[in-house]
Each structure stands twice: as C-alpha cells, then as structure tokens.
Image: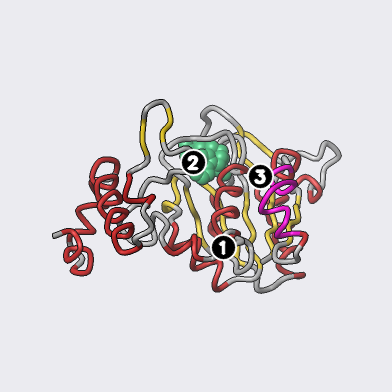
Amino acid sequence: MRFTFVTLFRPLMEGYFEDSILKRAIEKGLLSVDFLNPRDFTTDKHRKVDDTAAGGGAGMVMMPQPLDDALKHLKAESPEARIVFTTPVGKPFRQADAKRFASSQNHMVFVSGRYEGIDERIIELWADEVFSIGDYILTGGELPSLVMADAISRLVPGVLGNADSLSAESFETELLEAPSFTRPKSFHNLSIPSELLKGNHSKINALKKRLAIAKTKYFRPDRYLKSTQRESDEKSIY
Ligand code: SAH
C-alpha cells in the first residue's frame, strides 16, 4: 500500500510514520509514504496557495490551480491512485471503508485542506471519495488523513503481528469489543473477572460476549439496537 499525502504541512505528518507499527511496516516494504506540497505547484513569485472567499466572509480558501496541478502530476505518474478529500461535510469514515480500501487499493491519496477549506470545484473535479472523521472542525485535514491511513494500514496483511487480533475487534460486528485486562490479577482492589483466568475457552468466550453486549448497551445503544436485529447475535444474547 502506498499513501500520498497532499499537504501544505508535511512536518506535521511525517513523524507519525517514524516509530512503532507503521515504521516497521515501512521497513518491511508493506507500506510506503510520500508527500506532495501544493505550494510546489504555484506559479506566482509569492507561492500563494490561498485567496479570499468568493462572496465574502471570514477566512481564506485554498486556490484551485496549485491543487489541480499537484493532482495532475500525481495521476500522470499513478493513474490508478484513489483520491480521498478530507472535509467535515463528507460522509463519516468507518471501519468498513478502511477494510474496503485495504483490500482493493494499492495507492491512496489523501488531500488535506487548511484555512476555510478547498475551492469546491477541485473536490468536484478530483475526489473519488470525500470523508469526515467526525462532527467537529479541525484546523486542517492532516489529522483526518493520518486517522484514515492508520486505520487502513493495520488491515494491510502483515502489518499487525497477530492477524487474529483483528477478527474480534470493535466494529467488526455491531458489538464493541469486550474490555481488556492484563496482570496483576488485582489492582487497587479491582479484580480481573475470574472466568478469564481459568482457561476454559468456551466460558471465556461466553463471558466476553456478555461483557461486549453490556459495553455496547452502555456506550453505543444505537449499535446495540442494530445487533439485536441480527438473528445470529440474538441467539447468543438470550
Ligand atoms: N469552513 C469549513 C471547515 C474548514 S476546516 C466548514 O465549516 O465546513 C479546514 C480543513 O480541515 C478542511 O478543508 C478539511 O480538510 C479539514 N477538516 C476539518 N475538520 C475535519 C473533519 N471533521 N473531518 C475531515 N476533515 C476535516
């Protein structure tokens, strides 16, 4: 999987790939990461990338031309690249999207807006997909791009040491994952549920399922309701 980040602020992003799992994935050749700065595609001597908003209003808007030329450059080199724009008014990015990209794409491009956002015509011309990472406004698309790239990366075969850890995770079904514990058995007088320590795997799985249901009911009643609509989950609840 190759990721290209189109951003005015490369230094905000590159550190994320310089440690831990993603660093190792790059070293193993499972991931590669590069950056493209729209400022390198400006044509005026001030290397201007933003301009005042048409119709007035506060703030600056990212101009179409530098982004257009940057994306043309990229597509000429990599015609199959999938171009994703970040915007708070996009569709919500979900685990299912991360899975779809991890299994169907080799080259993902993430475009980060700044200021008041990007001239809408560039999104219209270039976006294969447009995503938001949640209902709040950030200062730029760099974090959303990293969030999506991270979620996709860990689904690329070989990136996580233990592929089994993926199957029981939250968002694989409507239910969230059961809470996790590690040693010591008792911490500040709080014990690990004793069934987890006895080694009976069918009992452990049944307990994990009950805990997953309790957690989902509490934190995400919307997902719990959906899960009760599924026959397979219903059976194990009752
Ligand atoms: N004025 C815009 C917000 C611009 S925020 C509005 O009200 O809709 C500037 C940039 O940050 C956006 O272009 C986008 O790239 C990024 N951004 C901010 N919040 C985001 C979110 N929740 N999800 C995805 N991208 C976001």
The tag on residue 162 is 1
Q: Residue furthest left?
A: 238
Percent across and percent down for residue 217 are 23, 45
| Quadrant showing the C terminus | bottom left
Position of residue 134 measured from the top left corner of the image (x, y, whole percent): 43, 43
Relative to 202, is 159 on the left or the right? right
Q: Is mark 2 within 8 Å of ligand 1?
A: no
Scheme by which the image is coloured: secondary structure
Q: In this view of the protein, can residue 54 be seen by the observer?
A: no
> Looking at the picture, which amino acid does disc 3 mark?
Met
Depth-wise, is mark 1 or mark 2 nearer the camera? 2
Q: Say which mark, if any, is on residue 63.
A: 3
In the image, taking residue 99 as reference, residue 233 lies left or right, namely left
Q: As displayed, is residue 156 above or below residue 56?
A: below
Q: Secondary structure at mark 2?
A: loop
- From the top left corner, tell me how far across and down residue 227 is, in percent: 23, 59
| Up/down of 195 relative to 52, above or below | below
Q: Residue at x 30, y 51 (%)?
A: 212
Tell me the CA gap for discs 1 and 2: 20 Å
Q: Residues within 10 Å of mark 1 (few under 14, many from 20)?
A: few
Q: Quadrant of residue 96?
A: bottom left
Report the amino acid beneath label 1.
Answer: Asn
Q: Which residue is mark 2?
A: 183
Give SS at disc 1: loop
* Of callouts 1 and 2, the N-terminal one: 1
Q: Residues within 10 Å of mark 2 (few under 14, many from 20)?
A: few
Q: Are marks 1 and 2 in contact (CB under 8 Å)?
A: no
